[in-house]
Amino acid sequence: MYTKTIYVIIDCLAIIDIIFTLRAIRGLRERSGRRLYGAMFSAIFAILANIMIALSPGPLFAEVSYCIYFSAIDWIIFFLSGFCMHYTEHHDIMKKMAVPAAIVMGLDTLSIFLNLVFGHQFYIYKNIRPSGVVFYQTGFYTPYYLHLAVDYIAIIVALFFIILRIVKSYSFYRIKYVIILSVLLFVILLNVAYMMFSLVLDASVVFYAVAGTLIYFCISVFVPRRLMNASISRTVDEMSEGLILFDVSNTCIYANSFSRQQFGIDVNTCDFSCEPIRTIIMALREDHTEYGETTYVKADPENDSRHYRVRYNKLSDGKGRSIGSFFLIKDETEEVYYLNKIKEAKNEADDANRAKSSFLASMSHEIRTPLNSVLGMNEMILRSTDDPEIRDYAGSIRMSGETLLSLINDILDFSKIEANRMELVETEYNLHDILRDCYHYFEQASFSKDLYIHIQCAESMPLKISGDENRIRQILSNLLSNAVKYTSTGGVEISASTAYKEDGILLTLRVSDTGIGIDRKDLPYLFDAFRRVNEKQTANIQGTGLGLAITKDLVDIMRGSISVESEVGKGTTFTVTIPQGIADKTAAGPFRLLDGSEKDYSYKEQFTAETAHILVVDDVPLNLKLICALLKKTMVQVDTADGGNAAISMCKDTKYDVILLDHRMPDPDGIATFEAIRRDGINKETPVVMLTANALSGAKEEYMGLGFDAYLSKPVRSEELEATLLKLLPKDKVQTV
Ligand code: ADP
C-alpha cells in the first residue's frame, strides 16, 4: 500500500510542477513555446492515467487507464519532437512532417484504444504482492512494439535535428542547442535507468515533467542569459573604446582588446601603479576629483601624438554600494585632428574676412574722398548758376556721382548684411516724398529710353509712416532701377497700397514693367548675390547682381516678404509687403508729382546762425574748402585746421560750438585729436562730429561708441550736414528758415 501511496504522491508533485511550468510557458509567445505547452499538457494526461493505474479497482479500469497512458506518451513525444525541430529552426521540414506525423500518432492512438476490443497490443495481469496489494501490470504482443518503434523514431528524429543544428551552427549559438540536447539525453537516460529496475508501477512519466521544466528553464532563462553574457563580453571586447575594470580592492580584473592593444595592459599584472593608468589617475587627482574625465596624450614616436579622452567612474550595485571602478578610454586623435583643421580653416576664413573688410574700407574710403569733392563742387555749381544748360550738365554729374555712390553703398550694405550688422533706424516719413524722389531720380533715365513711369498711391495711405525711410527708399529704388534698366519699350508702373492692422499698416509696393521678363527657370536664383540671370540679354546692361539680394535681405530684416511674377518678353512685377508703424494716420490723399517748375535742383538753407562758430578739421584742403562753401548760406563762422595738431592748438584758444573732424589724417589722426580735445580745455564738452569717408559696416556704431556726438559719411550731402548742425548748435544761436 505504501508503494502505491508513494507513486501517487510523486505523480501529484509532477502534476503540480507541470501546472507551474505550463503557466510560465504561456508567457513564451513563440511557436516553440506552444509545442512545449502541448507536450506538458499531454504529460498531465499521462500522469493522471498513471495515478488511475495505481488505484485501479479492476482489470478493465486498468486497461482503459493504460490506453490513456500509452496514447498520452505518443502525444508527448509528438509535441516534444515538434518543439525540437522548431527550436533548431527546421521550420520547413517541420511544416512538411507535422501532418503525416500527427496522422501516424493518431492511428497509433486509435490502435491502442482498439486494444479494448481486439486485445492485440497488450494484456492485463494481476500482480498480487506478498502484502496482498494488487498491481495491474501489462504483458505485450508484437503490435505494441510497433507503437514503441513509432515513439522511438520520433525521439530519434528530434535528436537528429538537434545534432544537425549543433554541427551546422557556429560556436556562439551552438551552446543553446547543446543545452537542449543534454536535457533530453539526461531525461532519456534517467528513463532507461528507471525501466531497468522493472518496477511494478511506471513512474517514468515523471521525467517528462522534469524534462519540460528543465527545457523551459533553459530556453527562457539559461540560454538567453548565456547568450546575453557572451554577446556583451564580445561587444565590449570588440568595441572601439577601451574599457578597464577594477574590483573594490583596485585590482584590474578586465581589460578589453582595445586597452590591451593600445596600452599593452596585462590583466594579470595591471594595477593603479602601472602606466598609463598612473598618469591618468594623477591627472584626475590634480582636478581634486576622485572620479572624472581627463585627456591623456600618448606620444607616438612614429606618428603624431594620440589623444585619448579618459573617463574614470565608480561601479556600484543597485543599492549604491561600490563594487569597483572602470576606465572608459576613447581615442579622439581624429576628432582633435579635424578640430584643429577646422580651427585653422576658421582662422584662415577670419583672416580672409578681415582682408575683405579692410579692402572694402580702403576702397570705399579712396573712392568716397574724391567723390566728396566732385559732388560737393558740383553742388556749388548748381547753387551758383541759373543757366539751364550748365544746370543740366551739373544735374547729370550729380546723377552719375550718385549712381557711383549707390554702387559703393550696395557693396558696403551687402557686407553689412553678411556680417549681420545691418540695423534699422526708425524715422517718420511721408511715402509721397519717397515716390516722388524715386520718380525724379529715374525720370531722366526713363525719358531717354522713351519709357513712362506711372505712380499710383492709395489715398488712404497715412500721412506719416514710421519705419526706416532710407531702407524703404532703397528697396523701391532698387526695384525701379531694374524695371527701367531691363525695359526698352512701354514703361513702369508703381503702385503703393496699404492694409491697416492693429498695430500699424502692411505697406505693399508693386513695381511692374513691360520689359524683357525673367525665365521661369531663373526665378529661384533671382535673389542670389552676385548672380545675374538671362546673361544673353543683360550682358550689355550694367549691373553687379547685388541689387535684388540686398532688397530681399532688407525685406527680410524688416519682417516683410517679396514675390515676383514674370513672363519672358512681356514684363515683370515685383511685390513687396512690409509691416510699418503709423506716425500720423491722417489720409495722405491723392498723390501728385511736382510740375516742371517745382522740380528743381534749387537749394534753400535750413537755418542761419551768424554767431555760431565751428571748426572743420581735414587734411585735404579741397574738403575744407567744400565745407566752407556748403555752409556759406547758413552764415556759420567756419575755422579750418589742416591736421590734428593745428586743431588741438586752435581748441586751446577758441571755444567752438561744433567741431567737424576727419578720421584718417597724418599723426595725430581724428580719434587721437578727439581724445586730446576731450581730455581738457575749453572745448572739452563741445559736440564733435565724425566726418569721414569710412562708411564700412559698423563704422557709425564704433564712432558713436567712442563718444562722438554724430557721424557723417563722405560724400557729405548738404541737407544732412545742415540737419546735423541744426541738432548740435546752441538753440539761441540758430534761426530756422
Ligand atoms: P543687377 O545689378 O544685375 O541688376 P539685380 O540683383 O538687381 O542685379 O538683378 C539680378 C538679375 O535679375 C538681373 O541681372 C536681371 O537679369 C534680373 N532682373 C532683375 N529685375 C528685372 C526686371 N525687372 N526685368 C527683367 N530682369 C530682371
Image (tube, rainbow, N blue to C red):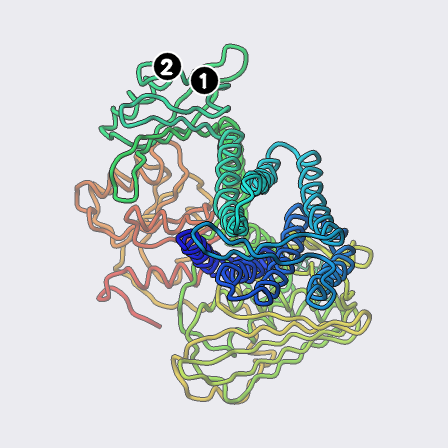
Q: In the picture, which quadrant includes the N terminus? A: bottom left
Q: Which circle marks residue 275 in the picture?
A: 2
Quadrant of the image occupied by residue 189: top right
Label 2 CA crowd tier, 10 Å (few <14, some 14–19, many 20+): some
Tell me the crowding category of disc 1: few under 14, some 14 to 19, or many 20 or more residues within 10 angstroms, Cα based.
Answer: some
Q: In the visual, does 377 lie left or right of 170?
A: left
Q: Is residue 242 visible?
A: yes
* Above/below status of 450 relative to 4: below
Q: Residue at x 50, y 59 (%)?
A: 54
The residues tagged by marks 2 and 1 sit, at their Cα atoms, a distance apart of: 8 Å
What label does residue 77 carry, if any?
A: none
Q: Amino acid at mark 1?
A: Phe
Would you name the residue on which mark 1 appears? 263
Residue at horizontal 62 percent and vertical 76 percent from the top? 510
Above-or-below relation of 269 to 667: above
**Which residue is the extreme one toward the top?**
301
Q: Secondary structure at mark 1?
A: helix
Find residue 29 and report its horizontal and vertical position in percent: 56, 59
Q: Secondary structure at mark 2?
A: loop
